[in-house]
Amino acid sequence: MAITSYPFDAQSITETDYSRLFREFQSTGVADGVGGSAFSVFADGTGMTVKVNAGFAIVRGHAIYSTATEVLTVAASNTSSRVDRVVLRLDPAANSITLAVKTGTTGSSTPPVLTQTDTGTYEFGLATVTVGANVTSISAASVQGERQFLGNTVGGWTTGTRPASPRTGRLGFNTTTSTWEFWNGSAWTSLTQSVDWSTLTNKPSTFAPSAHSHAWADVTDKPSTFTPSSHTHDWSQIVNEPATFPPSTHSHSWSSITSKPSTFPPSSHSHSSYLESGDTISWANGSKKPYSNTATDGTFYAVWVEGSGTFCRNTSARKFKENIEDFEINPDDVLKIRPVIYDRKDQVDGETGEVRPSRKGEVGLIADEVDELGLKWLVQYLDGEVDALRYDLLGVALLPVVQRQAGQINALEERLTRLEGALS
C-alpha cells in the first residue's frame, strides 16, 4: 500500500499532487457572483464567433486569469444544426488552461460530453452554442451560459461591518440582528422566510386558551345595570381616590402649633458643587481653612475637587500606589511651554442671567498649547475636549529640566577644575 504525504521541505512535489491538494481548498468554478461577467460567453451576430469576457477561475486546482475579452471561432454547420460547447480546457501535459470550442454532433441537440479525467485533460463548461443549419453568424439567443461558481465562505459580522456587495449567495451570521442572512445580488436577506398558514404541517386542530382576561367592552350579553345591595367599603378598597387632600389657604400662629421640637438638628444633606460664603465641609472631605488659620493638629492636606464637587485628600504615600515605574519626560518639550497673561471671560449665571465680571490680567498657561506639545499628562479633559491643567504637576515636569541642568553644571564645574589645574 503506497502512502504519500506532502508538501515538506526538500521534497519533490508534482503538479498532480498540488492540484489534488488545491482542489480540496476550492472547487472548480468561476470567481464571481451569479449573474457576474467573469468568463461569461456571448455573441453579437458578427460572424461565426463567440466572445468570452475576462475573469478568474479555478479548474481542478489550477488557476486561469484573463484580462481581456477573447474571440473564439465557431465552425459553420451544413444542412443540419448542432450544439457546441465553450470550455476551459486544462491540459497538464501542456501545462496550460485554454479557451476552446468543442464541436457537437451534427443533427443532435445534445452538447458534447465534457472530458474530465483525474490526472489528464479536464474540461469546465462555460456555455452551450446552438449552431443553426447554414447560418453565417451566431446570434445572442444562441448562447446559453452554464458556468459554475466558486464556493463562498460562511462569515460573521454586524450590520455595520458586513461585506458590501459580495458575491451572490454569500452567507453569514449578523450579531446585530441575531439572524442568518445572505446576499441576493442587491441586498442582504434574512434566511427566515414568511410562511403561509395553509402550508404549515402538523399544526394542532384546536387551541385551548390559557389563563387570560377580557376588557369590559369585549364582554357580550352583560346586564345593563347592577343594583348594589347594602354594603360598606374599606378605605383600601376604594379606587380613584385622590392621592393628596390639599387644605384650603389658611395660616397658623407659632404658638398654636403643638408638639413642636425645641431644636431642629439638620438632616444629612449635601451642597451644590461650588462652595458659597459661609459653607463648611467636614474634615473627611477636605479642609476649607485658609493658610492663615492655625491647624491645631499641625497637619495640612492638599485636596482635589471631583467633577461632582466632592473634596478629597491628595495622597502620595507609597501605600496608596502600585505599578510604580520611571516616567520619562522630555526636558525640551517642557522648555517649550509658554507662560502667558490673559483676561478671564465674563460668566453669565444660568439661572438669573446676571453677568459676573471675571478676573483680568491673570498669569498662567494655555492647556491647548501644552496638549499640542504632547504633555497630555498635564492636561485635564472634559467631555472629550481640553479643559484645564494639572498645575500641581508642573513641578514634576520641571524635575528633568533641573536634573539636566544640574548635570550640565556638574560637568562644567569638573571641566573648570581641570582647566584650573592645568593652568596652575
Image (cartoon, helix red, strand yellow):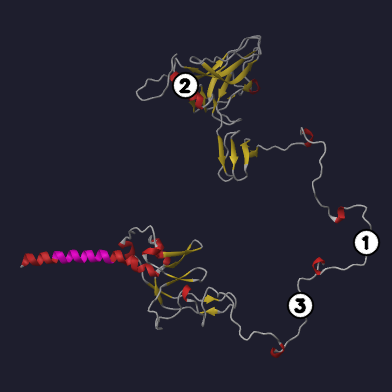
Vertical placement of residue 421 versus 55, above or below: below
- Which residue type carries mark 1? Phe
Q: State the SS at label 2.
A: helix
Query: Mark 2 or mark 3, which is nearer the start of the sequence?
Result: 2
Taking depth in this image into account, of 53 and 323 the one nearest to the observer is: 323
Q: State if disc 3 and disc 1 touch (CB < 8 Å).
A: no
Query: Is the residue marked by circle 3 packed among few (<14), some (14-19), or many (20+) residues within 10 Å?
Result: few
Q: Over which residues does the magenta segment extend? A: 402-415
Image height check: is 348 above or below 171? below
Image check: 46 left or right of 419? Answer: right
Spatial distance from mark 1 to mark 3, Cα to Cα? 34 Å
Label 1 sits on residue = 226
Q: In the displayed structure, does residue 186 sit left or right of residue 301? A: right
**Depth order, front residue of 23/276:** 276
Residue in front for this viewpoint, 65 or 1:
1
- With respect to residue 194, does 22 lie above or below? above
405 magenta-colored: yes
Q: Mark 3 touching mark 2, by CB under 8 A?
A: no
User: Which numbered disc, 1 or 3, marks the residue closer to the eye?
Assistant: 1
Say whether residue 20 is magenta.
no
